[in-house]
Image: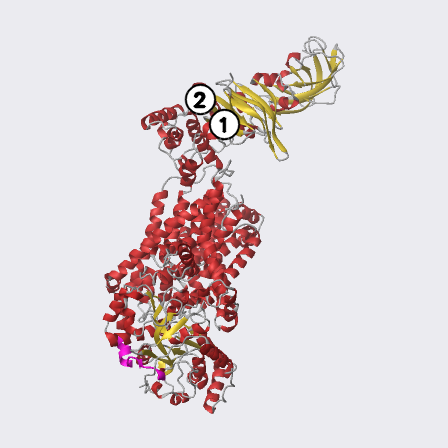
């Protein structure tokens, strides 16, 4: 796995300024299209030049950036970017399937169980992108049948508001969250909405048993919906700790000037593997295929790291000073555990927390 | 001491003078009407008596106590008066009984006593059997009775009525004006009654104050207003009349086309121009020439209309230009164009100032 | 003799034929209108009821849905919470709306135009936007009000917690009170001052007159307002989703939403939604019982002038109260929303270096959906308003002029959607029309149809009221002179109704722009509207962009309404010319 480095924390300021500077120098021209891409591009234009993308893999800003980048690389094509939480996106595609009116072309979810279920249902189109062999090894071969592929990854740690919590006092690992001193001050997402939170809850259940959450409930956490809600709570000063803190969103918020910081727990940062797939019967098949290529391209990974997410391509690396999965101890559940476990976790959560 | 006294009461709205120097005195138990055309200020005067409007000038006193003056007024809820409104203002969400009981409840009269007095009052207005009905279930006349009952049951010092019959049809109006007078007589309530209908005023009132342009032109008993109008307006407003102008030379008064001797008239200022009001029924129209000369004049029938109970004739003196209206009994039938004799009665010719 | 009888028979026959022809045309008309109403109202509701009795996937009849919907304690609790919310909102909205209505309609309180404007602003604000504003104001640790309190008193945490039932009731009540206000003030405008004078002169002073005479006279209106606020509150989705969830309780609408999570359980949702329907019907039945046989309108026509009651120094107290309500409903939330809309990071507060236009820029130029969403919202709302007004005007005409037998059935159907909460109606539409054969899922059509049905009652009430005020003799004059009925309608009726129709149009348009509860189930990716986008944005906590979008919504709505009322020439909120 990944060597455990000495913990270091990002404190904003200089590192971020450097980051900001380096970001603007990143405007590289897009690499030339491969013949396969060109073929798809022409076909996509003939289809109408438009495609619809449901994504839960990032916040709205990052998602929009990806869509726009695609439009720049492939002029004449338009992407309808619809960002929601994973369960909501999934709900919408299942509604569409039930109504036999598929609107979505590409689905990017954070709950790999969705893809497993859709594949079992025969609702995913088989397509193996050229780029799928070029991603980092850890992200390869989740579906040997080629109906879904990992297109993004993210991490969950513990975030905190530096105005309210000193670095020394901040929780160092997951079990520190159970300390009564954090009562009324922890923000969480909700697994019934967010795929990230679902996986996080499942991981911790694997690690510590559901008892962990029974105890956590005693600290009366503030429960939102999306995992990004936790960052909002920190920014607002409503909570001091983001119990399920998304690294990407939080770091982006730090860059905007907010007084936040990330803590990567000693017992492991949760790693989320987020897949995408093409909906069977979608209206813009070639556009969808081209988009899958795009999502796994270096260009897309660059955008991911620009917004503090992980890269899935070896060519692209995270900026200096920013932590990446390979630098940390990470923990995550298996695909089978996710498929079975998340619905269970949702039910247990409702029973424990009341909503 | 008079019950209600208005002294020099005026009301100005911006540039418009609605009420101009009203002086009026009511004795206890008296029924006085304010009669006049719309816009003459009668309703404004009534509302000042009630206390809804403050006078710009003048005072309103009741039994010596000042109620309204430019510097301040007793509010309407403390004047011990009652009012009947043009729209009856019966509260539709309460029964007849509850409506009538309202004023008594405010005066903290006990439940039993209230019930008794309400029952009594409703009997007086012949509405006893309808005590539990809601106003929507009543006719116009019945609602009017409820309004009266509600107003009178609290034994007000003054009862004010604001054109209460204008929403009723003719037959009901006749019936109700007798009712109002009857209730007045039974309870001896000092009453001020505002109307534009002279028949109503004549039937109900002890005295009538005829108003025009914010002023009282004449206050008098109905008979005197009719027989001896003091101004042209009063003469024309109460009943129909002929206005004839004449000049006196001491011996006789010369009119247009005829002359009458001065004897029999109250005044005989020589040389002055005199205006008389002559009622259509105060002259006699006959086919036979008069017994004495100068007792009647010859006239020609210009127009006529048969109204069932009387004939309406328009006649012209043979030597004159101005026409006169004459009323005769249905029996006297003069065709148009026929000649006839018109006899005057000096005593019935009112001199108008 | 023979001639005469032939004539007589000819006349008789002609009479029968013309009666038949009229019957034909009117029958056709009746059938056409019924068909439309069945499609819009009866079918979705019936499908909903049937769905509730069906097993998922197979369609067999079963009571299982009811059992699982009501067998769970959590679900029952959600129902109880909804009732609590509805009752609380009804009471609070009445406390807000009725005194202000009385003050404006019957007293000499100053600054009436401003207060009316403020009520209008509250009406235009969607409840979920108000909820966001209040979260920014009264979040237990972060809300501005709490921060001020903590600064003033040195306390360690604030005293207001918006994440509570009380908080939710407040948030919903401040956007619901315009209903109680409009109902009460239009009724009060009709009360002749003589009613109050009569009490006055019998010895009752201002307060007693108001409590014993004036307000009881408008009891039906007040009850109407209470019922509407109650029903709106229990059917709301947005504000409860934002506040109840963090407060850790569910209401029926948020619970229904859960039934639409994967796997979609329409049937169970339908079963769970039935009580909402039942409650609504019950409410209206109660209203009829209370109003009963007492008449409430002034029985005579004359003497109906309205004078303002002089309150003396109390008028400032009334104004203060109105301004307090205004602060809670409009000023405070708007202030924080504006701050967030122009902020880089709203948590950083009011400082010059926190100001930016980037949020608006992002929405209008970078977010690929926002522009289309904004256009969609106003386009759909406009179409809905036109459709609703046209349909209800036709029906109101038919009912008012009694053109067909049983015309009251049409009127009843038009008002029926009132009893169906928006969210339930949407589920019904989804059940009836989303799948093949019509396959309207994700189309603008299903959204517009859903909205039109939702707003039929308002449209019908306005159309019918407008028609009632027109004397049929106007059209009869045209017909006597030889014009057809259609000509009479076109040349006489419509011009006369212009103003009242424009007012009705706005009364449908504005709620349609902010509708969330039914939209959330019916939108597709291409037909998103602002309300749904705001909800989605709130999911990821991007309050700055959310506030900017909310500001855009409010500004455009207000501009359109302002133009509208200039065109109409009077306040569309049913105000009589005073």
User: Label 1, on which residue?
Assistant: B161
* Above-or-below relation of C7 to A33: above
The x, y position of residue C297, in whole percent, is: 44, 40
Between B282 and A194, the residue placed more toward the observer is A194
Instruction: Determine crowd level at label 2: few under 14, some 14-19, many 20+ residues with C-alpha closer than 10 A.
Output: some
Q: Is residue A331 magenta?
A: yes
User: Label 2, on which residue?
Assistant: B183
Name the secondary structure under disc 1.
strand
| Front: mark 2 or 1 | 1
Residue interval drawn in magenta: A326-342
The x, y position of residue A91, in whole percent, is: 35, 71
The x, y position of residue A78, in whole percent, is: 49, 78
- B286 to the left or right of C477: right
Name the secondary structure under disc 2.
helix
Q: Chain of mark 2?
A: B
Q: Is residue C454 magenta?
A: no
């Amino acid at each position: 796995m990944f060597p455990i480095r000495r913990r270091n924390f990002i404190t904003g300021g200089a590192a971020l300024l450097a980051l900001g500077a380096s970001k603007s120098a990143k405007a590289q021209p897009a690499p030339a299209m491969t013949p396969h891409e060109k073929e798809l591009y022409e076909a996509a234009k003939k289809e109408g030049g438009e495609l619809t993308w449901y994504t839960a893999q990032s916040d709205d800003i990052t998602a929009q950036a990806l869509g726009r980048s695609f439009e720049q690389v492939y002029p004449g094509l338009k992407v309808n970017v619809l960002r929601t939480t994973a369960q909501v996106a999934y709900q919408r595609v299942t509604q569409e399937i039930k109504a036999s009116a598929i609107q979505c072309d590409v689905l990017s979810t954070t709950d790999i169980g969705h893809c497993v279920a859709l594949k079992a249902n025969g609702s995913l189109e088989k397509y193996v992108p050229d780029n799928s062999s070029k991603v980092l090894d850890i992200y390869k071969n989740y579906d040997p049948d080629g109906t879904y592929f990992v297109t993004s990854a993210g991490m969950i740690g513990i975030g905190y508001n530096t105005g309210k919590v000193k670095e020394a006092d901040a929780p160092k690992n997951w079990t520190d969250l159970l300390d009564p001193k954090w009562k009324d001050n922890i923000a969480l997402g909700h697994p019934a909405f967010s795929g990230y939170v679902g996986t996080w809850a499942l991981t911790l259940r694997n690690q510590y048993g559901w008892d962990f959450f029974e105890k956590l409930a005693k600290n009366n956490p503030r429960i939102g919906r999306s995992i990004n809600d936790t960052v909002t709570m920190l920014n607002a000063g409503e909570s001091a700790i983001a119990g399920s803190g998304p690294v990407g969103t939080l770091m982006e918020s730090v860059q905007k000037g907010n007084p936040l910081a990330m803590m990567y727990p000693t017992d492991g940062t949760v790693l989320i593997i987020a897949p995408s797939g093409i909906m069977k019967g979608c209206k813009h098949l070639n556009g969808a295929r081209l988009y899958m290529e795009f999502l796994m391209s270096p260009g897309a990974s660059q955008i991911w790291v620009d917004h503090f997410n992980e890269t899935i391509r070896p060519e692209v690396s995270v900026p200096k000073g920013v932590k990446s999965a390979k630098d940390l101890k990470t923990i995550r559940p298996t695909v089978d555990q996710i498929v079975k476990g998340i619905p269970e976790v949702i039910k247990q959560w409702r029973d424990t927390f009341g909503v | 001491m008079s019950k209600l006294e208005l002294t020099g009461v005026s009301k100005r709205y911006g540039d418009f003078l609605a009420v101009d120097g009203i002086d009026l005195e009511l004795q206890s138990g008296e029924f006085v009407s304010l009669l006049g055309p719309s816009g003459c200020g009668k309703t404004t005067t009534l509302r000042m008596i009630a206390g809804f409007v403050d006078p710009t000038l003048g005072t309103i006193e009741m039994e010596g106590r000042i109620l309204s003056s430019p510097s301040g007024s007793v509010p309407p809820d403390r004047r011990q008066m009652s009012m009947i409104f043009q729209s009856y203002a019966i509260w539709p969400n309460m029964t007849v009984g509850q409506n009538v009981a309202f004023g008594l409840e405010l005066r903290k009269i006990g439940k039993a006593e209230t019930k008794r007095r309400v029952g009594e009052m409703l009997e007086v207005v012949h509405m006893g059997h309808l005590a539990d009905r809601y106003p929507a279930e009543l006719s116009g006349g019945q609602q009017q009775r409820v309004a009266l009952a509600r107003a009178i049951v609290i034994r007000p010092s003054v009862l004010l009525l604001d054109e209460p019959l204008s929403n009723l049809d003719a037959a009901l109006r006749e019936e109700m004006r007798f009712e109002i007078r009857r209730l007045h007589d039974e309870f001896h309530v000092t009453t001020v009654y505002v109307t534009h209908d002279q028949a109503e005023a004549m039937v109900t009132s002890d005295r009538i104050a005829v108003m025009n342009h914010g002023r009282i032109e004449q206050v008098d008993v109905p008979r005197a207003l009719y027989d001896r109008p003091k101004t042209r307006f009063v003469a024309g407003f109460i009943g129909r009349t002929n206005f004839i102008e004449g000049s006196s030379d001491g011996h006789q008064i010369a009119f247009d086309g005829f002359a009458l001797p001065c004897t029999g008239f109250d005044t005989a200022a020589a040389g002055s121009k005199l205006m008389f009001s002559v009622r259509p029924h105060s002259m006699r129209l006959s086919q036979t020439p008069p017994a004495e000369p100068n007792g009647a004049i010859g006239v020609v029938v210009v127009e006529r209309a048969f109204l069932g109970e009387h004939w309406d004739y328009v006649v012209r003196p043979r030597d004159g230009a101005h026409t006169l209206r004459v009323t005769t009994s249905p029996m006297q039938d003069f065709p148009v164009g026929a000649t006839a004799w018109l006899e005057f009665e000096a005593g019935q010719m009112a001199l108008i100032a | 003799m023979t001639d005469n009888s032939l004539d007589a028979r000819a006349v008789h026959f002609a009479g029968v034929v013309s009666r038949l022809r009229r019957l034909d045309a009117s029958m056709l008309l009746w059938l056409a209108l019924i068909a439309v109403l069945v499609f819009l109202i009866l079918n979705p509701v019936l499908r909903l009821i049937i769905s509730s009795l069906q097993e998922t996937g197979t369609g067999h009849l079963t009571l299982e849905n009811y059992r699982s919907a009501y067998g769970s304690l959590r679900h029952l609790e959600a129902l109880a919470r909804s009732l609590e919310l509805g009752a609380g909102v009804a009471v609070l909205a009445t406390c807000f709306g009725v005194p202000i209505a009385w003050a404006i309609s019957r007293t000499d309180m100053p600054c009436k135009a401003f207060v009316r404007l403020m009520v209008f602003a509250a009406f235009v604000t969607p409840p979920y936007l108000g909820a966001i504003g209040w979260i920014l104001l009264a979040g237990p640790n972060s809300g501005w009000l709490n921060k001020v309190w903590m600064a003033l008193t040195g306390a360690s945490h604030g005293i207001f917690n918006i994440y509570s039932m009380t908080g939710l009731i407040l948030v919903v009540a401040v956007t619901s009170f315009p209903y109680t206000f409009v109902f009460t003030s239009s009724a009060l405008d009709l009360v002749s001052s003589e009613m109050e004078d009569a009490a006055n002169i019998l010895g009752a002073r201002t307060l007693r007159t108001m409590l014993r005479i004036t307000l009881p006279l408008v009891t039906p209106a007040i009850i109407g307002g209470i019922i509407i606020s109650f029903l709106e509150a229990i059917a709301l989705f947005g504000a409860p989703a934002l506040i109840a969830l963090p407060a850790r309780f569910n209401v029926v609408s948020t619970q229904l939403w859960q039934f639409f999570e994967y796997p979609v359980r329409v049937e169970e949702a339908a079963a769970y939604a039935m009580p909402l329907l039942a409650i609504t019907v019950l409410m209206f039945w109660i209203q009829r019982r209370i109003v009963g046989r007492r008449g409430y309108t002034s029985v005579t026509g004359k003497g109906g002038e309205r004078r303002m009651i002089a309150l003396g120094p109390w008028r400032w107290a009334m104004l203060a109260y109105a301004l307090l309500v205004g602060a809670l409903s409009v000023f405070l939330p708007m202030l924080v929303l504006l701050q967030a809309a122009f902020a880089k990071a709203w948590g950083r507060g009011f400082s010059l270096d926190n100001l930016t236009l980037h949020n608006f820029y992002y929405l209008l130029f970078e977010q690929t959906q926002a522009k289309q969403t904004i256009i969609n919202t106003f386009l759909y709302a406009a179409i809905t308003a036109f459709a609703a007004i046209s349909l209800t005007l036709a029906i109101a005409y038919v009912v008012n002029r009694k053109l067909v037998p049983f015309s009251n059935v049409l009127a009843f159907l038009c008002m029926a959607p009132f009893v169906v909460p928006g969210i339930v109606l949407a589920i019904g539409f989804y059940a009836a029309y989303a799948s093949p054969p019509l396959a309207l899922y994700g189309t603008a059509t299903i959204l517009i149809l859903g909205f039109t049905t939702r707003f039929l009652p308002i449209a019908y009430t306005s159309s019918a009221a407008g028609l009632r005020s027109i004397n049929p003799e106007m059209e009869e004059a045209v017909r006597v002179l030889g014009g057809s009925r259609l000509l009479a309608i076109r040349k006489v009726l419509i011009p006369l109704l212009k103003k009242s129709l424009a007012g009705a149009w706005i009364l449908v348009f504005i709620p349609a722009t902010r509708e969330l509860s039914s939209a959330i189930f019916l939108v597709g990716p291409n037909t998103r509207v602002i309300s749904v986008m705001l909800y989605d944005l709130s999911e990821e906590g991007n309050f700055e962009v959310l506030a900017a979008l909310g500001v855009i919504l409010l500004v455009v709505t207000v501009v359109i309404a302002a133009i509208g009322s200039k065109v109409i020439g009077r306040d569309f909120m049913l105000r009589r010319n005073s």
